[in-house]
Image: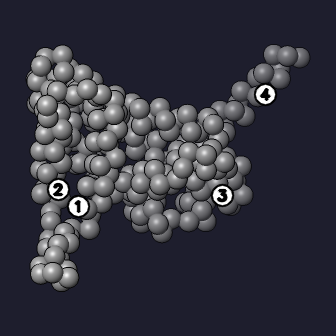
């Protein structure tokens, strides 16, 4: 009897996981095509071929769906950061490569930036009310995996004497958060300044300019005494 029940539960669990993957895949495709702000639960359900009630059977709400879609981006980002780090030898070369890869990924997938910034603006207690602990754990694991790629480079630089960083973990988190802000600037493509007292002016900025600035800032932060 027990084995029969287990065999019945296993396919059901597998079907549930498969449906969840299908929904997350459709969500990410919709984000990449239309952007995060314009994505609606109804659009995601339509893409999967189900009604919105099915979506809510798998996810507590839009926030959890966004969080787990972000995990998908983070998994891909971690892979690319690891490859960038392995492709260089010295800590300085690795830092530059990892930073460039982060910016390139954000430019390629602006929905990643939107998802990350949307969730970062929410206080932890609020997220816990809207996202299950298991989903929040998966999100934290995805973020920490990416941050580890950077903090490992910083640790290596400290060990070799190339970097002067007292807290690599804090600096890695700072670089991640500030990098997301820089990516938003790259998307807007404009800088605001004061051309005369009280007179604002706008000048263009390219993604390449932002990329170069973020890299030079990362190097400066890592080598500052």
Disc 3: which residue = 50
**Measured Cα–Cα span from mark 2 to mark 1:** 6 Å
Q: Is residue 80 left or right of residue 130?
A: left
Residue 77's place in the image compared with 38, above or below, is: above
Residue 81 in sight: yes
Q: Is residue 5 left or right of residue 108?
A: right
N-terminal of the pair, mark 3 or mark 1, is 3
- At 46% from the left and 46% from the top, the residue drawn is 70
Q: Is residue 1 left or right of residue 104?
A: right
Disc 2: which residue = 210
Residue 60's place in the image compared with 14, above or below, is: below
Residue 19 in sight: no
**Measured Cα–Cα span from mark 4 to mark 2:** 54 Å
Residue 46's place in the image compared with 175, above or below, is: below
Which of labels 2 and 3 is toward the front? 2
- The residue lying toward the viewer, choosing from 167 and 91, is 167
Which of labels 1 and 4 is toward the front? 1
- The residue lying toward the viewer, choosing from 80 and 149, is 149
| Mark 1 residue element | helix
Task: Say whether marks 2 and 1 touch (CB < 8 Å).
Answer: yes
Q: Residue furthest right?
A: 1
- The residue lying toward the viewer, choosing from 6 and 73, is 73
N-terminal of the pair, mark 1 or mark 4, is 4
| Mark 2 residue element | helix
The quadrant in which the C terminus is found is top left
């Amino acid at each position: 009897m027990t084995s029969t029940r287990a065999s019945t539960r296993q396919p059901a669990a597998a079907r549930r996981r498969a449906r969840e993957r299908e929904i997350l895949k459709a969500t990410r495709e919709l984000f990449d095509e239309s952007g995060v702000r314009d994505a609606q639960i109804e659009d995601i359900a339509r893409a999967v071929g189900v009604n919105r009630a099915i979506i809510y059977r798998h996810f507590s709400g839009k926030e959890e769906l966004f969080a787990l879609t972000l995990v998908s981006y983070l998994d891909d980002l971690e892979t690319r950061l690891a490859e960038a780090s392995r492709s260089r030898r010295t800590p300085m070369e690795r830092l530059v490569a990892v930073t460039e890869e982060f910016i390139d990924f954000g430019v390629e997938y602006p929905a990643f930036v939107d998802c990350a910034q949307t969730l970062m603006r929410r206080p932890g207690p609020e997220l816990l009310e809207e996202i299950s602990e298991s989903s929040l754990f998966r999100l934290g694991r995805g973020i920490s995996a990416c941050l580890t790629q950077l903090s490992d480079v910083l640790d290596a630089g400290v060990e070799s004497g190339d970097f002067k960083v007292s807290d690599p973990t804090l600096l890695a988190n700072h670089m991640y958060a500030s990098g997301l802000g820089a990516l938003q600037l790259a998307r807007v493509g404009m800088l605001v300044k004061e051309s005369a007292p009280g007179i604002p002016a706008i000048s263009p900025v390219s993604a390449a300019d932002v990329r170069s600035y973020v890299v030079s800032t990362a190097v400066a932060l890592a080598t500052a005494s």
